[in-house]
Image: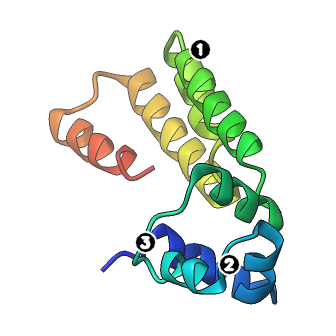
């Protein structure tokens, strides 16, 4: 079962050594009310949630900016070359090497003759894993 937002925030607060009592005092909330939210048993106002995130050094604006930037980057992909570059820059080193080997292998086949259907199927299956 997936944890509630409050439960996730409670885990983060605990990992940072911040107590529920300290957080409740800083936002002017009764500790019992904060506890209910952190256990997933009640909601929290937007203002209090933003204050809690601030106390935990979570920059919501930065998270939104990064997510928006990723979507914008995706939308700027206009051709096959851009797709390859976009996928490549978002892979770790092993993924990049794997992708390059696959592209090299495909290029070698394509340069010699038409790629056999069964090989094309294998390439398609393997490339979907990247």
Q: Sequence order check: which comes first, mark 2 or mark 1?
A: 2
* The image quarter in which residue 85 lies: top right
Residue at image point 64% right, 58% down: 49
Residue 64: x %, y % from top left: 66, 38
Along the line of sight, the residue nearer the viewer: 67 or 79: 67
Q: Is residue 55 left or right of residue 14?
A: right
Q: Sequence order check: which comes first, mark 2 or mark 3?
A: 2
Along the line of sight, the residue nearer the viewer: 29 or 77: 29
Q: Is residue 108 left or right of residue 26?
A: left
Residue 56 appears in the figure: no
Q: Which residue is mark 2?
A: 12
Q: CA distance from mark 2 to mark 1?
A: 35 Å
Q: Which residue is mark 3?
A: 42
Q: Which residue is mark 1?
A: 76
Question: Answer yes or no: do the residues labelled 2 and 3 have beta carbons within 8 Å?
Answer: no
Q: Is residue 42 above or below residue 88?
A: below
Q: Residues within 10 Å of mark 2 (few under 14, many from 20)?
A: some
């Amino acid at each position: 079962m997936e944890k509630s937002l409050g439960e996730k925030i409670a885990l983060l607060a605990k990992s940072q050594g911040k107590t529920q009592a300290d957080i409740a005092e800083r936002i002017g909330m009764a500790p019992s009310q904060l506890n209910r939210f952190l256990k997933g048993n009640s909601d929290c106002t937007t203002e209090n949630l933003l204050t809690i995130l601030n106390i935990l050094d979570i920059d919501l604006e930065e998270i939104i900016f990064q997510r928006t930037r990723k979507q914008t980057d995706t939308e700027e992909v206009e051709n096959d070359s851009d797709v390859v570059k976009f996928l490549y820059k978002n892979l770790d080193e092993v993924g990049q090497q794997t992708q390059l080997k696959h592209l090299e292998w495909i290029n070698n086949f394509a340069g010699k003759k038409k790629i056999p259907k069964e090989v094309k199927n294998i390439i398609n299956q393997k490339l979907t894993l990247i």
